[in-house]
Image (spheres, grey):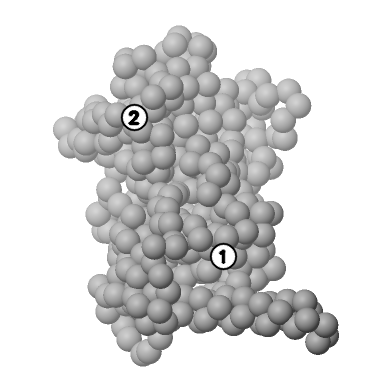
Amino acid sequence: MNIIFAFDKFKGSMTSLEAAEAAKNGIHLACGDIGIDEQTLRYITLPVADGGEGTVEAFLSSLGGKRLLCSVTPPHRHPKKDEEKVQAEYGILPDGTCVIEMAAASGLVLVPKAEQNPLFTSTYGTGEMILHALDHGATRFLIGIGGSATNDGGCGMAAALGARFYDVQGALIENPCGADLQRIARMDLSGMDPRIAACAFTACCDVDNPLCGEHGASSVYGPQKGADADAVRQLDCGLASLASLWHLSGCEKEGNAPLLTMPGAGAAGGLGAGIVAFLGGTLKSGIDAVLDAADPERYFSDHSLLLTGEGRLDSQTVYGKTVCGLLRRASRLGVDSMVFGGCIEPEAYALYGMGAVGLFALCDRPMTLDDSIKNGRTLLRERVRAAACSYFAGQRAGNQMYNDTHYAAERGHI
């Protein structure tokens, strides 16, 4: 039997690979508990991600390649006025494809808590990463756009690549942030790096939110990045204004949905839309992009068991996150899937309808959040151990029932 470990990160507690190792230890203990010959099992670890943190690692683990570092402007700093830089890592796959996590340059984790406010953050550093990759010969880009600190529609990224933005008086807005979007009266894209025209860009989205409105980037994710109610309204109006400029400037592709309503356009504070508008890119589900590269189906069969999970199983899990993408593929081939999470919200029970045979919360007794995070590996190991014992016992009982029935049928007893 193939035992496939394909976990997303448990934020603050375990990486994808650390979770897989803890689950593997749980299977090992379960085999000893109920007398399963571990030699009959084949362990397979698939690093997965949905466009956020861990996306580069997932691709490099599946396909190989090299890592590069570049010095970029963090999201809360101005490239011309501040000297502070951060080191951002990205990957180049064997076929030359560049894999970038925008969070490495423009992520919320880079901004001190006291300075988190998407009115004053920019994707400029993400544009600097793209420039660095262009200088190293990249022409195909996969850009994971989860975990952002920004809500600038990708204007900062475009400015780093040579775009120019002006207010109604004709003054240059050097590093557009969320608060600047309503000030932009004109954009000039003629100065953007000419190499971009020969490149293909795909944004790997971990959500499918539109750009604006009740379910848009600002309303849903702005508060997580430090925006209060007034800031959310300002940001939403700014993105709507930017969408109008894109439309008037001919940035929308013929045959595509308008950027204002395109699913995924609101990812990363509108960077999804920005990659389409400024770079001529396309949007794709992050987990589908990673799974297409990892090709988990080659391990799926009637004798496979998938173990997956993430820190919190909730409504976002059900709508296109890592776990959902894995279940869709596994269920098509009749593979049993167990899903583990630090906690389980009621909305996550929809995963049973997607093929999960069990949902398991790691916290099996009263404990603080800090304790659950600190002890995540032990909790996951023991929860997998208990779940696997039940699963293997059920398999054994089912096989015995089949054998008894088959034996009786051969002898005409039934």
Q: Name the residue under label 1.
A: 337
- Residue 222 is situated, as x and y percent measured from the top left of the image, at 47, 55
Q: Residue at x 41, y 34 (%)?
A: 63
Above-or-below relation of 12 to 160 = below
Q: Is residue 91 left or right of residue 399?
A: left
Quadrant (top left/top right/bottom left/bottom right) for the C terminus: bottom right
Q: How many marks?
A: 2
Query: Which structural element holds mark 1?
Result: strand
Q: Residue at x 28, y 31 (%)?
A: 67
Nearer to us in this view, 154 or 255? 255
- Looking at the rendered structure, the kind of residue marked 1 is Ser
Cβ atoms under marks 1 and 2 closer than 8 Å: no
- Residue 73 is situated, as x and y percent measured from the top left of the image, at 26, 34
Above-or-below relation of 47 to 158 = below
Q: Name the quadrant containing residue 310.
A: bottom left
Real-space CA distance between mark 1 and mark 2, rounded to the nearest whole angstrom: 30 Å
Of the numbered discs in the image, which one, if any, rests on residue 65?
Answer: 2
Circle 1 or circle 2, nearest the eye: 1
- Residue 393 is situated, as x and y percent measured from the top left of the image, at 52, 81
Q: Residue at x 43, y 57 (%)?
A: 42
Tell me, yes or no, if residue 404 can be seen here. Answer: yes
Could you classify mark 2 by the number of other residues whose Cα lies within 10 Å: few (under 14), some (14-19), or many (20 or more)?
some
First in sequence: mark 1 or mark 2? Answer: 2
Query: Which structural element holds mark 2?
Result: loop
- Residue 115 is situated, as x and y percent measured from the top left of the image, at 28, 53
Q: Residue furthest bottom?
A: 366
